[in-house]
Amino acid sequence: MFNSEDKIIYLEKEYRDIANAIDALDHEIQMEKEPFHKAEKIKRRKEVLGQLNKKRLEIKAIRWENTKTAFLSILFLAAIAFVAHFMGLIDLSVLQTPQHVKKM
């Protein structure tokens, strides 16, 4: 099973492959003389461009989930530290800036 980083790497590889296919189609469109074949290739390019956008959105969604998970983890740890401080289990006063360092 893939973890999120492996999945991002895999999707980025697919993204590069699709981008290369679009570049090849662009070249074929420029070289094509027949209007009918050119129109077909332009239509195919739009389809491939849609696939490229879909991959981009998948990568963006996975990265957002990773960011959200990290933020919630930090928030959870801060809440636990805050509760532990008020229960007297830990002393968070050491995190305050000392008076001699403060600039006024």
Image: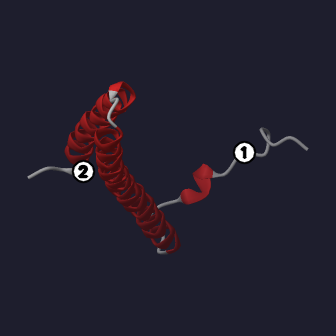
- Measured as percent of width and height from the top left, residue 24 is found at 29, 29
The C terminus lies in which quarter of the figure?
top right
Q: Where is 63 relative to 10, above or below?
A: below
Residue at numbered disc 1: 98
Count of numbered badges drawn on the protein: 2
Label 1: element kind: loop
Picture quarter containing residue 26?
top left
Proximity of marks 2 and 1: CB atoms separated by less than 8 Å: no
Marking on residue 4:
2
Label 2: element kind: helix
Q: Where is 79 relative to 10, above or below?
A: below
Q: Is residue 52 left or right of residue 95?
A: left
Picture quarter containing residue 101?
top right
**Could one spot residue 48 in this view of the protein?**
no
Residue at image x 18%, y 50%? 3
- Measured as percent of width and height from the top left, residue 57 is found at 37, 55
Judging depth in this view, the residue of 7 and 80 nearest the camera is 7
Crowding at dot 1, Cα within 10 Å, few <14 / some 14-19 / many 20+, comes out as: few
Q: Mark 2 or 1, which is nearer the eye? A: 2
Residue type pointed to by label 2? Ser
Picture quarter containing residue 16?
top left
Q: Is residue 58 left or right of residue 85?
A: left
Residue type pointed to by label 1? Pro
Judging depth in this view, the residue of 99 and 77 nearest the camera is 77
Residue furthest to the right in view is 104
Residue at image x 13%, y 50%? 2
Q: Where is 70 relative to 79, above or below?
A: above
| Label 2 vs 1, first from the N-terminus | 2
Judging depth in this view, the residue of 12 and 51 nearest the camera is 51
Residue at image x 23%, y 40%? 14
**Could one spot residue 20 in this view of the protein?**
yes
